[in-house]
Amino acid sequence: MTTYGYNGTYLFNQSVIQQTLTALRIPNAGVTWEVANQSNIGFDAQLLDSKLSITADYFYNLRSNILAYRNASVPGSAGLTLPQENIGKVVNKGFEFQVGYQNRAGDFNYAVSVNGAFSKNHIQFWDETPGVPDYQKSTGNQMNANLYYKSIGVFKDQAAVDAYPHWSGARPGDIIFEDVNKDGQINGLDMVRSKKTSIPTFTGGFTFNLQYKSFDLSVLFQGAAGAERAYTTFSGGPGVGNFMYNMVKDRWTPENPSSTNPRVWERGGAYWMTDGMPNNTYFVRSSDYIRLKNFELGYSLPSTLTNRIGIQSLRVFASGLNLLTFTKVKDFDPESPDTAPGSIWVNSQVYPLNKTINVGLSVTF
């Protein structure tokens, strides 16, 4: 199965278009909708007397006429600001699949299903600022990929500070930023564009259902890969919360000049934080995860027994939700929402995920 579509979209909403037409800057009366060219190829099959099912789909979407500024100029600069124009192009492509198998063997009934989806976008064109170093360009990378200073350790003592380029005011216990362009100083030209965003490029799941006589079992695993999250804690400074234990246990102190974690800091007073938000890879973690999302084991009384006591069915069960999670994000839920729409930060004030265990009885009269 193959499809192709072409349509205009209001993705960049009316407020953006109104701002582009406003008299606060040079107007652009030629602003129009984005254009989406969408195509896909699909495959569906039922095999082995419908015991095996396969569904697969590949898609390629080109979105053009995206509103963007020429030379990446932004509002707020001195004088008049050039208006946004319909010049941006973004490609999004990927695939989805699901494979399921069900069968029975004697008193065993079972069904297994695996599904996954891969989707990755990249900016094809948006008239990037001239002279931007290749390692900072967003063109060719995913939308909203962030710039970070590369953390390469912690200054153990003053000799280490003196021996390597550093941010003004750096002292022992501070995070070391890599001098990426080797010019002997640390500034904005040493920030590097990440290849990942907070949105996974791959998501998937695995389900298993088994029934043997009066027993039943269902298991659901889910996972995601290809994303990263930078985290921030409401920590540091008078009247502010405590630091996470993982940040404190191996922190730098004069007595323990660790190269793992930096010294404690005022929440907004360290150069490795911008307005309380981290600006470097020390705070970035892969948010790939695999989670045992749901597990349920049940037993149903045989009908010969339920009929004797005047009921249709009786089932006892035990279930668990979010029982196990395997991830490098130890102090946060890798699925937790961003601090704000479009943000990449995981905020420590987001309530942690709960593990839930239930034991129940289901009766039908």
Image (spheres, rainbow, N blue to C red):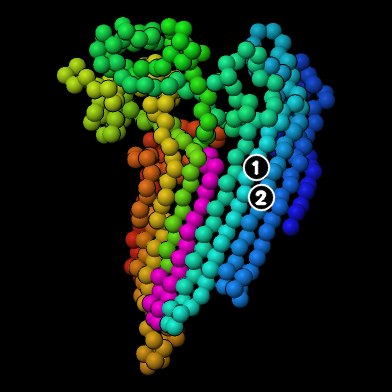
Indicate the quadrant where residue 171 lies.
top left
Q: Position of residue 221 (x, y in %)?
A: 44, 57
- What residue sits right under mark 1 in the picture? 93
Whether residue 79 appears in this view of the structure is: yes
Our reading of the magenta stretch's main secondary structure is: strand
Viewer-side residue, 276 vs 282: 282
Viewer-side residue, 49 vs 189: 49
Up-down relation of residue 358 to residue 142 (above or below): below
Q: Secondary structure at mark 1?
A: strand
Please, what is the three-letter code of the amino acid marked with disc 2?
A: Tyr
Q: Residue furthest right?
A: 30
Viewer-side residue, 81 vs 181: 181
Q: Position of residue 62 (x, y in %)?
A: 72, 38
- What residue sits right under mark 2 in the picture? 58
Disc on res. 39:
none
Q: How many marks?
A: 2
In the image, the segment drawn in magenta is: 199-217
Up-down relation of residue 54 to residue 69 (above or below): below
Discs 1, 2 touching: Cβ within 8 Å: yes
* Quadrant in the picture for the C terminus: bottom left
Residue at 63% over, 26% down: 139
The answer to if 278 sits in the magenta stretch is no
Up-down relation of residue 289 to residue 179 (above or below): below
Q: Residue furthest front?
A: 48
Residue at 49% over, 18% down: 191
Please, what is the three-letter code of the amino acid marked with disc 1?
A: Lys
- Please tell me which of labels 1 and 2 falls first in the chain: 2
Q: Secondary structure at mark 2?
A: strand
Q: Position of residue 144 (x, y in %)?
A: 57, 30
Question: Left or right: where does residue 77 sit relative to residue 136?
Answer: right
Whole-number angstrom distance, CA of label 1 to CA of label 2:
8 Å
Residue at 55% over, 53% down: 116
